[in-house]
Amino acid sequence: MPRSRARRASVALLAVALLATAPIVSLHAQTPSARSVAAPGLPSLGDGAGMSVADERRLGDKIASQIYRDPDYLDDPVLTDYLQSIWQPLMAAARARGDVPPELGERLAWELMVDRSKTVNAFALPGGYLGVNLGLLAITERPEELASVIAHELSHVSQRHIARMVASQERLAPWMLGAMILSALAAGSNANVAGAAVAGSQALAAQNQLNFSRDMEREADRVGFGILSSAGFDGYGFVTMFDKLQQASRLNDDGAFPYLRSHPLTGERIADMRARLPLGQTAGPLSLAHQDPAKPAATAGLPSIGQHQLMSARARVLAEGNADRWRAWQQQGQTASALPGERYAAALSAMRLGQRDQALALAQRLRGEVAAAEQPAVDQLLLELLMDPGAPLSGREAAQLATLRDQLLASGSRAGLLLGAQAAIASNDTSGASARLLEWVVLRPRDALAWQLLSRAWQVQGQTLRAVRAEAESRAAHYDFAGALERFKAAQALPEVLRAADPIELAIVDSRRREVEAQLRLWESEK
Ligand SMILES: [Zn+2]
């Protein structure tokens, strides 16, 4: 994506400038304070070991606002829901264990983002923003493997490692730090670091300044393992994930595993994880029949291996831009013995290749092959394929589209709501969808994609003023206050006939415009 590269290059160049002028103490020379080692489960808020929670959140918001604008930022409702089904139990366990005390829980963002990149990476940013690349989702085979990496990153945040690291760079203004972190991230999502030549090497230098210390890694492993197990995931996921990263990086040393650069896998880390498992689990290869006897019974709400395999297949296809790979997956998923993940990848690949009839046939077949837990994911795929404007629908397909649309709109899941709304917009029949979207954003005003769809739904209904307001809200939700203000002003400048309909609506626009103006002033004063 050229636009993304250009932006990343400019961010990286910014980092070059500041690395040249501001010598930075390497984090590797530092160890956490004695207090944090003695009581690692109790983050010491505002004790001077790091920046304050409020400052960390402000820095994180600034960084997040840049990430939201990056074309590689991906809010795929299907994958987002799946990641939430892993993230929410981990967060609940971290809160219950006291790893995330109430103040930290309330004041940080705790938001998991997705990057389109197919390189294998996960990262924790200041302010409680975390990210995973599609590449990581694509190489994992079981929910607990993905969960182990996310639990580890979550622990870097809960243990205030980031605040301590950032505070150690005290000579830098926060915006410079933000630029450094973004450039390190850009290097991490670019498989071909050599291709980014100059920017890449400088970004790598920035990355080296920002790596966690060995003590922090050990602590994130230990706390992360506790969170993973308490959430009901199989702790063995940590071990298989380590093995997988190690094997894959041995075969593949082309920079596709930036996760290993920032989280070196030492023999000690692996041995330490194995030692945490109950006896009897540490030997022998992993089999699909592996069960953790110590696992509490209350894991019913966690995603199944089958769900994971469908979502991992989705991540593989979405991260891939090469049509030859899509053709290979399309072939592979057509055989009678294809696994559900392979069938899913084949259907999605066929759609990307413009072969909608075949994509639909594969998805219909998959529907009959999966267990109940995986049914919603297949229904969502089917609706996506039916909505594809590539070819006209038969009468039967149109009926199926309408049924799935209504079912998904009422399903209560975010993916169902947003996909259903998209289908409603495509068929110019949005009254049901806009009411549900409005209910949704009232409770979740930071859901930018939901605001965007609401804007389109209102546009379909000819409610121009409301549509422009929803567009403004979608920008404000991603901290684009200047863009939001511009839309609110545009709403107020609409010709009388378009905006006169509803005085209440006009009053809302006016008060929201003032609020956003104030937010913008504050935001700019913080630079
Ligand atoms: Zn780490």
Image (cartoon, rainbow, N blue to C red):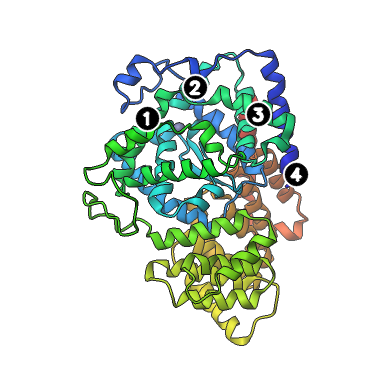
Q: Residue furthest bottom?
A: 395
Mark 3 to mark 2: distance in Å?
17 Å
Helix, strand, or loop for circle 4?
Answer: helix
Mark 2: amino acid: Met
Q: Which mark is residue 203?
A: 3
The residue under label 4 is: 3
Q: Which mark is residue 165?
A: 2
Residue 369 as seen in the image, left or right of residue 475: left
Mark 4 to mark 1: distance in Å?
41 Å
Helix, strand, or loop for circle 3?
Answer: helix
Residue 234 as seen in the image, left or right of residue 48: left
The residue under label 1 is: 268
Mark 4: amino acid: Arg
- How dense is the environment of label 3, judged by Cα within 10 Å: few (below 14), some, or many (20 and up)? many
Q: Position of residue 51 (x, y in %)?
A: 48, 20
Look at discs 3 and 1 and give the one toward the viewer.
1
Earlier sequence position, callout 2 versus callout 1:
2
